[in-house]
Amino acid sequence: MAADSQNGYLGVTPPISTLESSPREKEVTVTLMEELRRQNTFESEEEAKTREIVLGRVAALVKKFVKRISMERGLSETAANAAGGKIFTFGSYRLGVHGPGSDIDTLCVVPKHVSREDFFETFEPMLKEMEGATEVSGVPEAFVPIIKCEISGIPIDFLMARLALSSIPDNLSLKDDNLLRSLDERCVRSLNGSRVIDEILRLVPNVQVFRDALRCIKLWAQKRAIYSNVNGFLGGVAWALLVARICQLYPNAIAGAIVSRFFIIMYQWSWPQPVLLKQIEEGPLQVRVWNPKLYPADRAHRMPIITPAYPAMCATHNVTASTQMIITEEFKRGAEIVDRVIVGTAEWSELFAKHDFFHKYRYYLQVIASTGNSDLQLKWAGTVESRLRQLVMKLEYVDSLILAHPFTKGFDQVSYCLSEEEVRAVAQGEISDAVASRKKEDIEGKEGAGPVYSTTFYIGLAIEPKQPGAVGPRKLDISYPTTEFTKLVKMWEKFDESTMGIVVRHIKSSSLPDNVFDPGERPAKTVQKRLKGSGKSSNPSPDMPNKRQRLVFAHPT
């Protein structure tokens, strides 16, 4: 425990309680850990060994990359060898809460003569040549520029930070704030991933309790489809910061008790009051520190959860009005279930029940990104996904729309087309049974035939109930948000109209494709029942699929 030496406790306020957990809380912690094992949240020893081997290979590749660039810049072989290069892990792997198939967030620290362009133009191709590497895809224009790939089945996300040093020694530590001197903002953001995790682990009273509680909250957020920074929900760091804050408030509680307090406190939190693990520090460097009094953009953050390493940043700048409402509802649901777990009337498994996103709304938007090339599709779909939040924010201004609910992942499909007409139809989201059943070998050697790679993202639309006395179908005008969104994604510097497609279209829940449902999950078509003696539907929710309300959509064709 690394208590604050000035006041004897961790955090910006004294603990709420320093009591040990009750016997009942100890019992439910045992059942929680059993459920987490049953849910397969722990990796096998074999996978753990594979990760270590992969990280060793990556560390060697980064040194090779730095040496290659050093030689190109005219350094002697001795100086090029000494230039070094080092990797630091962060994210769930560094926190110790990763599960089977989790990605490893990896920071590549390079000396000053290696540029960000080198990272994408030289290191990315080197990764592609690496044995066992697949799906290598760089997104240089992301908020934090990133290369994603899989090596020996382990997903890895690479960030790069270029320090103002001529060489990177093997014993380099990232604790020193002065390392941030003269770095650009993207490098500071990249470097901070690792520095933040180290600070979180330093600021929690009991690391193992924190890990067990966080493992639970991560699984819950993933199952409920609210684990995604890019789509406006919370990412791994934000969830870790929230759990760490609850651990500070109950320093002697065990995991089951922390989880219980987590839901109660987070549901009642007075946003936009920030969540802090320690007081925000000013530093000697010319870097921006989160400050809502100074910066209007910081003042606009809806659910500010602030990173503890200097310079303090908001881990939740992507949260929108819609995603905040959805997260708050999930906190409420979690609090109610865990209450019942504590008193013995519910099981932990209920907390982890799968989301109901594809059963929840009558209307959805499909955003379809398509290309004819698998490598290009990874980049194009990633670019579209990174802009999806902008569409959600624009939809929030549409009259009679309560919220726009983005789903946290896209659905990939390969369609084998025999004609240009079929290609166009697939790009529009119209996949005929003939195309859907076709295999790769069915189009081989046929002139004009080829694959179409598509990724479909979904946004659920919660629509206000029809006003009493209103007649005729209502009009939902989404033409402005969808036009602006397609313009925005087409502004990508690598966009090519002839090889990339982007389509936004609305569909009814009854028209959702089978690939969004698990086997046996799709609801059977039901006849609308009406309550006796009333003209009302038996389901009064404003946005459930079987609510009868005619709607005319206005958006560009």
Image (cartoon, helix red, strand yellow):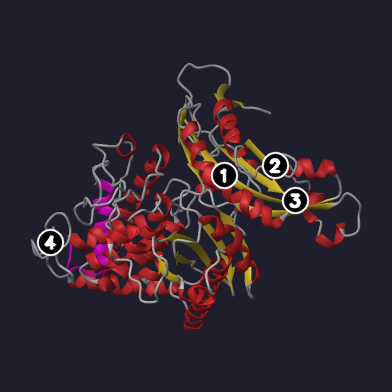
- Quadrant in which the C terminus is drawn: top right
In terms of secondary structure, where does tag 2 sit?
A: loop
Residue 258 pos. (x, y %) = 25, 63
Q: Which residues are magenta?
A: 250-268
Question: Between marks 1 and 2, how big is the CA–CA gap?
Answer: 23 Å
In terms of secondary structure, where does tag 4 sit?
A: loop
Read off the residue under disc 2: 496
First in residue order: circle 1 vs circle 2 = 1
First in residue order: circle 2 vs circle 3 = 3
Mark 4 Cα-neighbour bin, 10 Å: few <14, some 14–19, many ≥20: few
Q: Amino acid at mark 3?
A: Gly
Residue 539 appears in the picture as rendered = no
Q: Look at discs 1 and 3 and give the one toward the viewer.
A: 3
First in residue order: circle 4 vs circle 2 = 4
Residue 21 pos. (x, y %) = 18, 69
Mark 2 Cα-neighbour bin, 10 Å: few <14, some 14–19, many ≥20: few
Read off the residue under disc 4: 17
Q: Amino acid at mark 4?
A: Ser
Read off the residue under disc 1: 458
